[in-house]
Amino acid sequence: MSNVVNLRKGQRVELAKGISKLRIELTWQASRKAESWDLDIMALELNEDQLIANGDISHLVFYNNLKDPQGALVHSGDDRTGEGDGEEMRLDVSKLHSGVKEVLFVLNIFESMKKNQNFGEIKHTVLRIYYDDDTTPALVYNLEEEESHRTATVLKVVSIYKSGGMWKVKAINEGVTSSLSSVLANYGLESNDKSI
């Protein structure tokens, strides 16, 4: 692929025709280096009502559930520094469960509430989307610091969604100040652990 598209907040881009396989890579740097920071990328497979598909937690893919039931979405495993290749996922939209209309990518700071950490202290967060096995990204999203990042503990990054038979990418970059469990509850996943 030749031209790299640099995404801006709110922008929507159609995936190139014939492309179904993507690699999504996320890197970042913490400004307080002395501290232990653990950012985790996760993806929620949502139905047309923006609820987790089938109400099933197996459609939440993250470091503790490395792939969905169809093998359409696969996580690379936990990366605690964000340097190098960071954390990444591979997505094959052609394999997604038929009820999945959107894949929402979220970045969470592990134990942020306990450690009093937020996205105001995370710099150079970059999401890259590669087509198939390309080594040059097709889409690059530099997540510029927003007002909502100052206290945010969860960051909604991008959505890959189906519209009119086409798969599209929407750049979001929206910070949420809440526990991860509260955010997941908005998508129909309830958890007893309110500290995460």
Image (cartoon, rainbow, N blue to C red):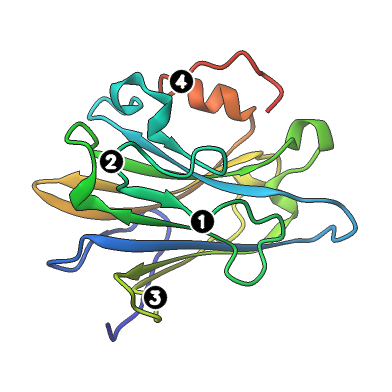
On screen, residue 144 above or below 45: below
Q: Disc 3 vs disc 2: which is toward the camera?
A: 2
Mark closer to the chain start, 3 or 2: 2
Distance from disc 3 to disc 2, alpha carbons, whole Å, reads: 25 Å
Mark 4 residue type: Leu
Numbered label attached to residue 182? none
Taking depth in this image into account, of 127 and 93 the one nearest to the observer is: 93
Question: Residue 81, percent across and down?
Answer: 71, 60
Mark 1 residue type: Ser
Question: Residue 129, percent across and down?
Answer: 39, 66
Q: Secondary structure at mark 2?
A: loop
Distance from disc 1 to disc 4, alpha carbons, whole Å, reads: 23 Å
Numbered label attached to residue 189? 4
Q: Are marks 1 and 2 in contact (CB under 8 Å)?
A: no
| Side of 108 where 90 appears, left or right | left
Q: Secondary structure at mark 1?
A: loop
The residue that mark 2 highlights is 70
